[in-house]
Image: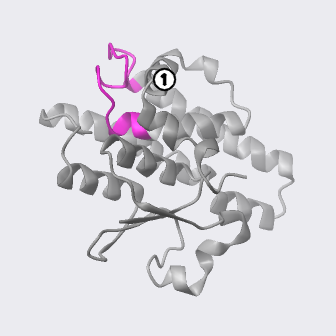
Amino acid sequence: MKLHGYFRSSASYRVRIALNLKRLTPEHLPHHLRKGEQCAPNYLAINPQGLVPTLEDDAGAILTQSLAIIEWLDETHPNPPLLPTDPLRRAKVRAFAQAIACDTHPVQNLKVLARLRQLGLPEEKVTEWAAWANREGLAACEILIAQEPGPFCFGETPTLADLCLVPQLANARRFGVDVAAYPRLLKAEAAARQVKAFADAAPDKQPDAE
């Protein structure tokens, strides 16, 4: 199994956590996003979007998109499960994860910020945009799990929701967001930080970290 990623990519970070929880050890193949390595022809041949992560299984099948990869991992390596068995709870976990992975992260990712710079926005405005996107998304997520007892987002064990939350909080801090405004999210993050699979997946623990 091979994982194409980048140490600071929050989408790659999500998948690294999942792999660690499943006790899987793929070969890690870094692609430096700021140097444009994700646009190299040989990489575009396996991921035409030019995004990370991409997972190659042992048979050579190619999987893209972090949530699809994580759900495939959960279906093919079911222990520990990353989604509840109850259909309603599964939907709630997926909704939380998608609020981050589909509606928050893409608005502040490297590709969008690069386009804002191309359009002439000064760097402080680009950073303000990214901070705004994080605040909007995290504020909604705070409400989504406000009544969940925890300590994780949805109960006593980590789920897909936590795999999305922890990297997004890291992003928010990079853009200067005061995350103290989200105490329920921080409670879930604190629980995750006690889990080795999360700690080992952190950007600063990766071999390609700068």
Q: Which quadrant of the figure has residue 208?
A: bottom right
- Can the viewer see residue 102? no
- Can the viewer see residue 56? yes
> Of helix, strand and loop, which mostly describes the magenta segment?
loop
Q: Is residue 52 left or right of residue 98?
A: right
Q: How far from the left and from the top, in percent, is residue 170?
A: 61, 36
Amino acid at the residue labelled 1: Leu
Q: Which quadrant of the figure has residue 148?
A: top left
Quickly name the residue at label 1.
185
Q: Is residue 157 magenta?
A: yes
* Vertical arrangement, residue 5 with respect to residue 167, above or below: below
Q: How far from the left and from the top, in percent, is residue 8?
A: 62, 51
Q: Residue at x 67, y 33 (%)?
A: 173
Q: Is residue 112 left or right of residue 182?
A: right
Q: Residue at x 57, y 53 (%)?
A: 9
Residue placed most toward the observer, 33 or 7: 7
The magenta-colored residue range is: 144-163
